[in-house]
Image: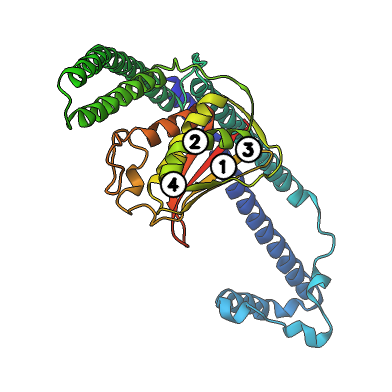
Amino acid sequence: MSKKWKHNILLIFPFVVFAAGTIFTAAFFLHTYWQIAFEHISALCETILANVPEAEPQLLAALKEYHSLTEEKLKGNDYLEKYGYRADDFCYDFSPDTVLFPILFFLVTACAFAAAIFLFRRKNRKRIADLTAYLEQVNIGAGGTLVQTQEDEYSHLQDEIYKTVTSLYQTREMAVAAKKNFAENLANIAHQLKTPITSAFLSLQLMEKEVPGTYAEQVRQQLKRLNRLEESLLMLSKIDAGTLPLKREKVDLYTVLNLASDNLNDLLRNNHITVDIPENGCIEFLGDLEWTMEALINLIKNCMEHSKPGGVVHCEYSGNPLYVEIRVWDDGAGFDKEDLPHLFDRFYRGRCAAPDGIGIGLALARSIFELQNGTITARNLQTGGACFEIRIYSH
């Protein structure tokens, strides 16, 4: 007999014993009721015949007629009440031994059933706890195995969990390897771009000296754009490879917002845009000042590009025990509904994107905040304008 069959038998046995005990107890009580009723009627007949011997034919006839009575005529019959008798007047000298054994048997059976259910549930809870602990270890990267020597109803589930975990490990390793290869390829492309861009800048300077022309400035702008693209690709490759150097030091939100704004002074002045940063006290988080400033520069620049001349880019910050929050918004027309789901996608350029943009700034900002245990979302304000919300969590 297999272990699984033994387990099933042990599981079913308490139910069988409990059902048998219940049936036996009911049958015993019914038999006891029949015996007591017979003894009482027999004693009544004996008393009648002892007092009136000649009434034996009438008594036998009455008993025969009593046997022919239906349940409807017997139920609720209170004929003796008019003579002052009650139901409990005929239940004297009732021996408790007649019901003690079935009651004890029923209690023992019920206790055995309850104990079996308790042990079964405790075993199930332990198996579930073991499987849960194993999955928790897998989720934190600790791995390990869960050894179960005996087969039970969870064995198949355990095997499937192991197969799924193994498959996920393999998929993860393949994804990590693919991401590493992508980051290396991206870095190689960026490095390969650097040399021809530098050469093109030098050639452009020589051309401007020998053959001045109106097209030189256009070429210079395109080369600058290529140079920004190369720098962004290098940064993306570092982020993907996990080699971007991020510090863990206290960063004051008011300070980093002002530094980001100061780096855009020339652009803001040329576009007649101002930045409003009200001071809200000293609120700090653990992160990297330089990279946080870089991300905020991209957000403020994006708001500036979508503001009308004379507009204002608003910045505010706050904090609580769980996270610090930064909000950056403008007074422009807001995001296009079709652009909202893709704003932070790499190389995505919306309908109203700046003509010299390459679609990397917002993606970089999101990556920088995520590396610092943060999140960033974008939405349109009800009063008009686009709004970025950043939360950097403490834990």
Mark 4 crowdedness (10 Å alpha carbons): few <14, some 14-19, many ≥20 = some
Residue 241 lies, in percent from the top left, at 39, 16
State which quarter of the image contains the C terminus. top right
Tell me if 378 is positioned left or right of 230 in this view: right
Q: In this view, does 204 lie above or below 22?
A: above
- Residue wearing tag 3: 254
Q: Residue, x 39% and y 21% (percent of image)?
A: 235
Q: Is residue 58 above or below residue 256?
A: below
CB of mark 1 within 8 Å of CB of mark 2? yes
- Residue wearing tag 4: 378
Q: What residue type is labelled 4?
A: Ala
Dot label at residue 296: 2
Q: What residue type is labelled 3?
A: Tyr
Using the numbered discs, state the Cα–Cα distance from disc 4 to disc 3 in whole angstroms: 21 Å
- Residue wearing tag 1: 326
Q: Is residue 300 above or below residue 293?
A: below
Secondary structure of the residue carrying tag 4 is strand
Using the numbered discs, state the Cα–Cα distance from disc 4 to disc 1 in whole angstroms: 12 Å
Q: Mark 2 or mark 3, which is nearer the start of the sequence?
A: 3
Q: Mark 1 or mark 4, which is nearer the start of the sequence?
A: 1
